[in-house]
Image: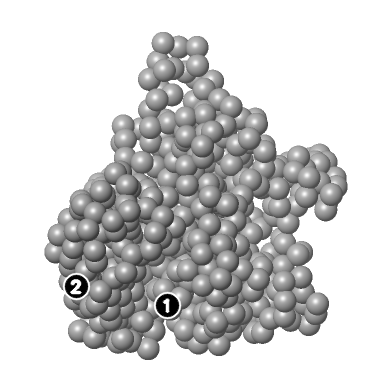
Amino acid sequence: MKKLLYFLFTITLILPSLKSEAQDRSQKPRTIVTTDGEIDDVDSFIRMLLYANEFSIEGLIYSSSMWHYKGDEKGTKFISEMEMTKNLYGEKTDLRWPGVTWMQDLIAAYETIYPNLTQHAEGFPTAEYLRGLIRVGNIDFEGEMEKDTPGSDFIKAKLLDDNMEPLYLQVWGGTNTIARALKSIEDEYKNSNQWSEIYDKVCGKGIIYAILDQDATYRKYISVVWPDIKIYYNSNQFWCFAYPWKRAVPEAWHQYLEGEFMGQHIINNHGPLTQMYYSYGDGQKQAGDDEHIHGDLSKLKGAQWGSFKKYDFISEGDSPAYLHLMDVGLDNLEHPEYGGWGGRLVQAEEQPNRWEDGENAADYNPFTEKIDKTYPQTRWIPAIQNEFAARADWCVNDYKNANHPPVISLKHDDELTAEPGQKVVLKGKASDPDKDKLTYSWWQYEEVDTYEGKVELNKNSAAKASFTMPSDIQKGESIHFILEVTDNQEIPLTRYQRVIIRY
């Protein structure tokens, strides 16, 4: 009886703190991560933990994909529905399965650096809170969505709760666990008089951010039964953060992904979490994945995507899914077509609830002097990698000995109207928490404009800039200007403000 009373007393102390933490985080973008555990998912997860104060993580779900599944442990053979993996692997009983404990292992490492992280920014979730979000979803086979699982039930409950803030469902593997959650909702409500209300509720809050199609469940089920649920689909831009990054990233910026930068500023001497980050030649080997040979450089001669050195970046192909949620001042969260650290996606003409990259979302690459489908993501790599390095410092340094981003605001609204020929003055202001000197730069994001011309800015390297509204601008057209402010530290940090000028 004493043990029971002690248990109940302890629970009454713990539950309010957990509830308070969840409430504090609900003001930030809500998100659930589904992951198949590939080595690039592990690396994406490590970075995400260092940014975890920026959004409200509300679920961490193990799922499967065309590349990774557990099998049913009954010897059942499976052939992929996806042409590439069907040809690569043929019949398999299981495939490169990394297990369902690696997130817990990383969170344990995060727990040791958590006290240090909280010196630098508010809002980092506790390890206890994060562990409470982990569920196992549909993992037996690629695309398996026939049965309810703890992971699918968790997603279902979140989609049906009374919080109508957008819920971003990150897809780092296949969409099958999300599909199962939706199928369970359909099965429960489709033939009831609540179906229309439930359908609208789920479609009104759920937003899927998918990196490629890694099973067929979106195409075969979600897009058919739930055509009104929003999907952000990244099939091109993520490549600059994935295995063939040397092809996608301009050579001048390779330095941000090479071993000298990664090893010195992120992986080594920054605590146990970043030490677990997979990189080339690091000697690490993921259990369960016999294709993870990257840690042994002797096995990589004639590697598919180039030659690599120790601590070179391997891949974080899924990171754009949460980089989209970071508020760095680019106002991209509700406008993926504006572009931000998660890339730039435009609304599909034939499917209004689908935003995608590709030719219509390509940006001009000044290094190749060509339109580039990857550059809307690539263009932010120096700033993103510098941010990663700064946050790695937060793991081990006190506030005084680390860098923190500048704080920027505008002295006017972020949307202005002007007439052709009118002079427009743009005014920003910034401060730095570390008292660093700041560099200002205004630039026009031409690919996002609906006005097709180029505008000449006066004094674009100061807090205040001006321009004359072009005489040939048409009614309803807009021009986007970005104020970019960077501090002068060895590893500089950057923040932004966007101003949209409309006629």
Earlier in the chain: of badge 1 and badge 2, it is 1
Dot 1 lies on which element? Answer: helix
Q: Residue at x 47, y 58 (%)?
A: 343
Indicate the position of residue 50 as horizontal and vertical percent values: 41, 68
Q: Which mark is residue 386?
A: 1
Q: Nearer the viewer, residue 448 or 400?
A: 448
- Residue 210 in sight here: yes
Q: Residue at x 32, y 40 (%)?
A: 165
Q: Is residue 336 left or right of residue 184?
A: left
Type of amino acid at the residue the image marks with label 1: Asn
Mark 2 — residue?
464
Q: Is residue 415 left or right of residue 379?
A: left
Q: Give the vertical position of 295 relative to 329 (above or below).
A: below
- Residue 155 in sight here: no
User: For mark 2, does the 10 Å Cα neighbourhood hold few (<14), some (14 to 19), or many (20 or more) residues?
Assistant: some
Choose top left, top right, bottom left or bottom right for residue 332. Answer: bottom left
Q: Nearer the viewer, residue 101 or 95?
A: 95
| Quadrant the N terminus occupies | top left
Indicate the position of residue 205 as horizontal and vertical percent values: 38, 36
